[in-house]
Amino acid sequence: MQLLEQRILSDGEILPGGILKVDGFLNHQMDPVLLTAMAEEFHRLFADAGVNKILTIEASGIGPACFAGLAFGCPVLFAKKNRTRNLSGEFWTSTVWSFTHNVENTILVSKKYLGRGDRVLIIDDFLANGAALDGLITLCETAGAEVAGAGICIEKAFQPGGGRIRARGVRVESLARIKSMSDGGEIEFC
Ligand code: 5GP
């Protein structure tokens, strides 16, 4: 998506370790005009997928997911991260390995809001190693919900997540796919 690629080039910042900082328009301050355009693109891509629910993970997926919820006219559910593991039987749970913090998080959603009969579009801001997406897909499978696909704002295609999730049979659509990033500030899209 050209608008997003242009914004990454003008406002994105490359940090050491292959991290792209997009705090000016997506991860801290958010640009509602850009988020609306991205939501419309997700809707165009998944219009015929029978989506009745959008699922994301806190915190940075919530913004794009809410805009997508408006475009699809459906509820938006976000998985909470929980490290206490002291859970009653009211939640579906799964685990996500955090490469940034070197810790395994339990993620959970209430059984009230996800289950059989749901057809879910998963939305997230980034796809890198795919741990977050793996955890969300497993959460849907545990709940008996169908995964219609995953809509990703920025995929770092030089990391293995996208390939692995697609090989798992899940349709992944990314609005910007980064082929390479250099410490000198060069970004190449696929
Ligand atoms: P994963 O490696 O599981 O695909 O990515 C997990 C999460 O890490 C994403 O949802 C995103 O919030 C964060 N993340 C991964 N790579 C980047 C990056 O380059 N920049 C930013 N801002 N967040 C990232």
Image: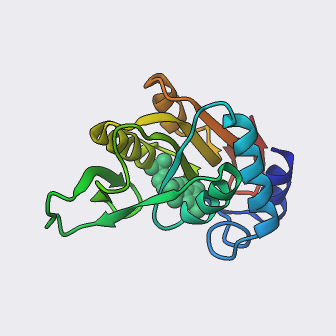
Q: How many marks?
A: 0
Q: Position of residue 179 (x, y in %)?
A: 69, 38
Q: Furthest residue to the bottom? A: 29
What's the colour scheme? rainbow
Query: Relative to 88, is 30 above or below?
Result: below
Q: Quick one: quadrant of the C terminus?
A: top right
Q: Which residue sits at x=40%, y=37%?
A: 117
Does 124 sit left or right of 67 as displayed? Answer: left
Reply above or below: 81 against 133.
below
Q: Between residues 29 and 115, which one lies in front from this camera angle?
A: 115
In this view of the protein, can residue 28 be seen by the observer? Answer: yes
Instruction: Describe residue 155's horizontal placement relative to residue 85 as left or right.
Output: right
Relative to the observer, which residue lies in front, 142 or 20? 142
Give residue 140's position: percent from left, percent from top: 36, 41
Q: The N terminus is located in which quarter?
A: top right
- Position in image of residue 2 (x %, y %): 86, 46
Image quadrant in which you'd find residue 30: bottom right
**Rendered residue at 16%/64% (across/down):** 87
Q: Position of residue 50 (x, y in %)?
A: 58, 34
Which quadrant of the figure has residue 144? top left
- When the figure is inspected, residue 160 is found, relative to residue 64, above or below; the finding is above
| 104 displayed left or right of 48 | left
Judged left or right of residue 87, residue 13 is: right
Q: Is residue 19 visible?
A: no
The residue located at (67%, 60%) in the rendering is 67
